[in-house]
Amino acid sequence: PFALQVLPGSLSPLEELPEPVLEEEILLDGKPYIEQWIVESIRAKHNGAILQEARKAKEERDHQTEALTTEIADLKKEKIATEKEHQKLKDTIKVVSIEMKQQTENLEKAKEQRIQLEQETELRRAKLEDELEKLTEFLNERLKTLVELDLLTEDQASLVLRKPSTDQPQSGHVYSDVFSSDPVSAVDYIQAYLYNRGIIYSKSVLLDFFALVKTHDLIVLAGDSGSGKTNLIKSFADATGSESTIIPVKPNWTSSEDLLGYYNPIEQKYMSTQFSDALIRAGQDSGRLHFICLDEMNLARLEYYFADFLSLLEERDSAPQLHLYSENEANHVVSEVRNFLSLIDEAKAQTNKQGIVGFIELLKNDEINQKLHGMCGFQKGDSLLRYHAYLRKLLASYLGSPSSLQLPPNVRILGTINVDETTHYLAPKVLDRAHILRFGNPLLADWTEIRQEIRDFELDLSSPIRISASEMGIRTSYPHYDDADQITIKLKHIVLEFLEPLGVDFGLRTIRQARLYSTELEEFGLTSTAILNNIILHKVLPKLMFDGEKKTPDGTERKQLLLQFRDFLLAEISDVSLGPLQASCVTELDRLILVAENNDWVVNYWAR
């Protein structure tokens, strides 16, 4: 009934509501609508709340964005750290690979050196066997005659045909079978074996000695009389089925002849010594280890009588060769004996006395005696009896002392010293090449703790371990100098920071020697700290002899630098890091410092 009247421009579209908000809905096509001005009015009314809500949403979004950014940064850092760790691991693997390669190369080189040594030994053996064969052929032809003429004894005749023994002792527990060639178990058994015999040594001493024996280096046992130096050598040899020879050094030894002997041109024989006889015996018994110990070796000056032999010990690529006398003298022996036998045969033929055999019968027969006297060109005062004695000594000397001798690989050279007013200090040349193992007063040892170390074995403790000479280490070259080796790094730091300013020599050879020793100790499971401790005890402390009041090149008093060295060792090596009853280099250095303080700061490792 009403007409729709709209003014032009007054018509506006309705706004669709997002959801029903009015009690009276205006529905168009099923959807609620309202005029725009109402919407603007409501928006204006609630605009503050909307803006606040928007700011809140934005802050929350910004916070979430910041958290995500931080998380992304952390992930990036973690990724970088992971990559660094990965690279470090790759570098470690590379270093280990290089070390493994180096060890493999060293092993291959050691094998090659071993093969070369075996070849050289074989060539030398072949040469000696050839010489011996020539003599043997002659002796075999006339052996019976030589015995009948009393130029050879029955034992010497048997020696001509006897070959060097390589048999192991028949009694004892086989090292490779019973102990699976495990040196730690072997040391435990040796300790128990000796304790069963009333002999007590700590496991650390026996372990250290075992490792030193495997290096083939010169070992010097230092300590007061009665501290167990010589007894350790004898006991260890007995416990391992080895041989030991103890040679007392005389104060009047002044040359290598006192050690090795000499050739007497007047008597035309080699005057052997107990030392050279021990070397020859060892060569005839190659299966067993032989310990040759120079007892109280500093009663005479080592640089006088031992220097030549010490230089020979430096030869590591092949067995050292000892030349005792000219090989031509051996030919003279054979020639002279052959001529004498020929003259006897000729004298028998000319006198028709072939039935006379023995030397006494020859002496009793005036006709033969006179004939030989003329044939041999004897002068007034000469006699067949005297010439016979001369030949007998000559032949015995040749059979007992070869013209040259290789240092047998089954020999270990050791020495004991006791530093007091009757002895001499060890020269730097000796200290450079030797390991010093110092013994304390046994009365001060903790015997209860040592007894607690001793293991129980379900074995016959009256039987030794049968360890062959080859199982006690093969003589090889010292390891090469390696800047990356941890022991080398530590020793180099000690040399640069302390020893060099103190005027103490410590060369490349000593570091290489220390590396070989550390390799042997690693087989016993010792830590790098314990190994460094032993090297300081063996190779560094024995060299400390100087005036502590003097100053170093930079103006520091040497005693202050010595105290700094002590603090360095304390930081590097603590008693906790060492094995049970293992001697501490820090404790030993403290003893040295205390003695020096009471002696006007004259630092001397050997002083008391």
Image (spheres, helix red, strand yellow):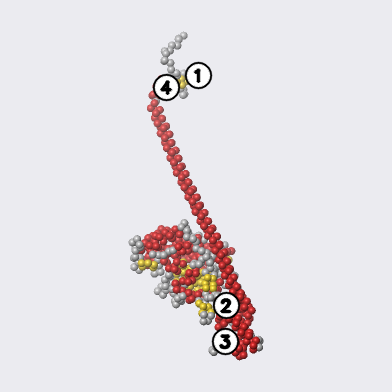
Per the rendering, the mark at residue 331 is: 2
The residue at 40%/67% (across/down) is: 605
The residue at 50%/61% (across/down) is: 479
Percent across and percent down for residue 313 are 49, 68
What is the spatial separation of the Cα atoms under label 1 and label 4, in whole angstroms? 20 Å
Percent across and percent down for residue 186 are 54, 64
Percent across and percent down for residue 574 are 43, 59
SS at circle 2:
helix
Quick one: label 2, few (<14), some, or many (20+) residues within 10 Å?
A: few
Looking at the rendered structure, the kind of residue marked 2 is Asn
SS at circle 3:
loop
Residue pointed to by mark 1: 29
Quick one: label 3, few (<14), some, or many (20+) residues within 10 Å?
A: few
What is the spatial separation of the Cα atoms under label 2 and label 4, in whole angstroms? 136 Å
Residue 372 in the image: above or below residue 13: below
Per the rendering, the mark at residue 377 is: 3
Residue 594 in the image: above or below residue 151: above
Residue pointed to by mark 4: 39
What is the spatial separation of the Cα atoms under label 3 and label 2, in whole angstroms? 21 Å
